[in-house]
Amino acid sequence: MSTRIYNFSAGPAMLPTQVMEKAQEEFCNYHGVGNGIMELSHRGPQFTEVIKRAEDNIRELLNISDEYAVIFVQGGASMQFSMIPMNLMLPNGFSEYADTGTWAAKAMKEAKLFGEVKNIATSKETNYDRIPVIRHWKPTQGSSYCHITSNNTVAGTQYHSFPEKMADVPLIADMSSDIMSRVLDINEFGMIYAGAQKNIGPSGVALVIMRKDLAKRTPANVPTMLRYSTYIDKGSMFNTPPTFAIYMIALITDWLKEKGGLKVIEEINDMKSEVLYELIDKTGFFHCPVEPGSRSKMNVVFRLPTEELEAKFVKEAEIGGMLGLKGHRLVGGIRASIYNAMPMKGVEQLIDFMNEFERVNG
């Protein structure tokens, strides 16, 4: 058995070993100041450099223009479910949402508190086993915005292309589970947001990248800490931000740059998911319930012949040094989350285990 424990959890998820070791090295004494980064003032020079580096790295990795703000907001992606309609729903207007899974449905529920929500597309009737065919969508001119969830962690689906840019209707994407896992054109979106705890950091902060002009929509009665302009105008430091989480984002984006950027990361992620799906598809023992064209490269879901075998699979995988493989409680089965930090060696170890498990139990 390998001494390396691989965490396949959907989040909080595995972080790069190199980053964890760097954080450990600096934990009690950041750059020789005699204190850890969590103890230092967010107004001081050390953290000022950290948050600037985090933003600069993100801008470089995603090729973000000055038309967009990069901000760090507490409350996770779930807070964004409310902040988006609170700030961006036009007066007496409506918004459009694609219902492709659990988190998309939760976002829709929150939006309905602030205005009319139209369901532009859904795969609920087939248990969210696909992304609805985008060419069949009929966006409505005058919509406040169109919202999608780019990767669905529970269902194991992912957008591999995005709706065409619509005049005056900003596309907003919850990218919590595939942010910075691939190259994308930020200019196709009015806003993207992501909880950090899957691909870019620990829990406790959401990354929001939005066109600055959209913040002007916010009604006057939205509270200060729920206004996007508060974070934009004050550089995410109107109040004390989650300093350690932002520090970790700075380290992870440093790591992404050292790896060669998102093009290289995307190639690695493609390879990891391809070898897993290849194994699943060549056998009758494992089965993926997701349509091939919609399969996630971040969350590979599959089933075994019985729930008893699935429970045995999870238990024996843990003994073999692989954690977090139990599927979401709403759908069961097995889920292998293979975010950026999961090395190819971890996927290879899982494949070896799957082959052996099938040999013994098939």
Image: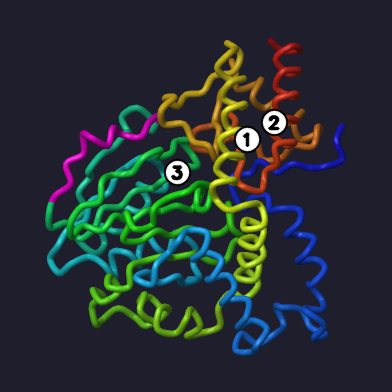
Main secondary structure found in the magenta portion: loop
Look at the image and give the residue range highlighted in magenta. Answer: 129-140
Dividing the image into 4 quarters, which one contains the C terminus? top right
Q: Distance between the Cα atoms at labels 1 and 3?
A: 18 Å
Q: Which of marks 2 and 1 is nearer the N terminus?
A: 2
Whole-percent x and y of residue 150?
Answer: 41, 46
Q: In the rendered structure, which amino acid carries the disc numbered 1? A: Lys
Q: In this view, does 359 lie above or below 240?
A: above
Whole-percent x and y of residue 71?
Answer: 46, 72
Q: Distance between the Cα atoms at labels 3 and 2?
A: 24 Å
Element assignment for label 2:
helix
Residue tagged by mark 2? 314
Label 1 crowd (10 A; few <14 / some 14-19 / many >=20): many
Viewer-proximal residue among 75 and 48: 48
Which residue is at a point 70% across and 37% down the rendered structure image?
Answer: 344
Q: In the rendered structure, which amino acid carries the disc numbered 2? A: Val
Residue 182 on the magenta segment: no
Q: In the rendered structure, which amino acid carries the disc numbered 3? A: Asn
Whole-percent x and y of residue 268?
Answer: 61, 39
Label 2 crowd (10 A; few <14 / some 14-19 / many >=20): many
Q: Earlier in the sequence, mark 1 or mark 3?
A: 3
Residue 151: which disc? Answer: 3
Label 3 crowd (10 A; few <14 / some 14-19 / many >=20): many
Residue 326: which disc? Answer: 1
Dividing the image into 4 quarters, which one contains the N terminus? top right
Q: Are marks 2 and 1 in contact (CB under 8 Å)?
A: yes
